[in-house]
Amino acid sequence: MAISVLHKLRSFISTKSPQSSLAAPDTASASASALAPVPASSPAAGSYVLNRDYQGSSRLNLQFFLWKNALQFNLHPDIPQPKANVRIADVATGTGIWLVDLASSLPPTVQLDGFDISLAQTPTPKWLPPNIKLHQWDMFTDPPAELVGQFDIVHVRLITLVIKDNNALPVINNLRKLLKPGGYLQWDEVDTVGTYIESADPSVSTTAIESLFMNLTIPKSARGRDDWKTSLPETLDQNGFRDSKRYTYTCDLATARYWHDMYMQSWEEFATRVLGNTEHTYEMINKAGVEAQNGAAIIFPKFVWVAKAV
C-alpha cells in the first residue's frame, strides 16, 4: 500500500567510472580537537532533535549497517578507490562508525578525519585506529584555514534536519572549501517525498503506521525542508562542482522490518523531545508496532549524490 508523505512528513529522519590513484598529506595520530566555538546563530546550534545518549548512538550504529547493506558500499563506485596517502573527511560523523568501518578496508596511510558539532557519541580517540582524527566543527561555519583544500574525498550523510529555509548552499559552500580541485563529494540522504508503506498482503492493516507518520506535525523551528534535494545536482554544478549525479536505492524487503524499527526509534526520540505528548506518542507507537509484527513497514528510498570539485 503506497501513500504520499510530502506534505506531512518532511525532513523527519533525522551510476561507475575508471579507478585512479589519489594523493593527500601524511597520516597523524588519532586525536580529537575543537576547531571553533559554535555560534549561537548557527542553524546547527542547539537544533539536534534526537538523542545523543547510548540509545541514540545505538540507533546511529544500526542505521550505518542498514545503509551499508542497502548500498553495498561506503564509497560510491564513481569515486576512485583510495590508495596510499589520500585524505578523507566524514562530515556529521555522529558516532564515527562510517570512518571506523572504512578504515578497515583502506591502507593505514589513508588519513581519515571526522567532523561533527558534537563528539559526544564518538569513541575515545585512544581506541581509534591511528589514522583517524576527530574534530568538533559546525559545518555552517567556514572550515579552519589549515583544512581548506586538504581533502580528496568528503562524505556527508543525513543532515536534512539541519538544512534551514530550504537552502543547502551554506553547507555546499563549506564542503567545497574542504576539497582539493578534482576531489569528490558523496552526499547521502533519505527520500522523504517518495516514502511509502509496504504490507505483506492486503489483509495487513497499516492504519496506525499511516496515522503515526501522516499526522506528524514538526514545529518549523525544529526541522528543515527537503525541497532542495530535488535540484541538488544542478545546485552543486552551479556552486563549485561538476558532473553531479543522483542515484536512488531501496532496501530489500528482507530488511524492511529492521529499517522500520529504526525509524520508529527515531520517531520516538523526536516526538518525546520536541512534541512532548508522551502518552499519545507511545499509544501510536505501540499500535504501529503491532502492524509491523504483522508485516507492514514504512519505506524511505535512499539518495546518493556524487560530484567532483572544480
Image: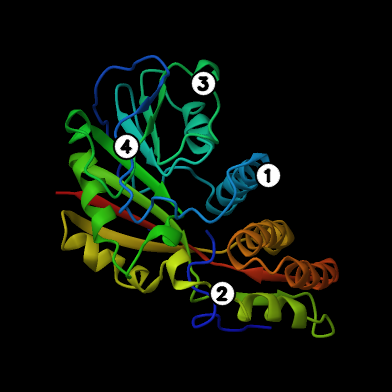
Q: Amino acid at mark 2?
A: Thr
Q: Position of residue 49 (x, y in %)?
A: 53, 56
Quadrant (top left, top right, bottom left, bottom right) of the N terminus: bottom right
Q: Which mark is residue 55?
A: 1
Precedes in sequence: disc 2 or disc 1: 1
Residue under label 2:
195
**CA distance for labels 2 and 1:** 25 Å
Q: Is residue 110 visible?
A: yes
Residue drawn where x is 29% and y is 22% of the image? 85
Question: Is the C-beta separation of discs 3 and 1 under 8 Å?
Answer: no
Q: Amino acid at mark 4?
A: Pro
Q: Position of residue 210 (x, y in %)?
A: 69, 80
> Which is more foreground, mark 3 or mark 2?
3
Q: Position of residue 188 (x, y in %)?
A: 43, 55
> Which is more foreground, mark 2 or mark 1?
1
155 sits to left or right of 3: left
Precedes in sequence: disc 3 or disc 4: 4
Pick the front one: 123 or 73: 123
Residue under label 4:
37
**CA distance for labels 3 and 4:** 24 Å
Residue under label 3:
128
Q: Secondary structure at mark 2?
A: loop
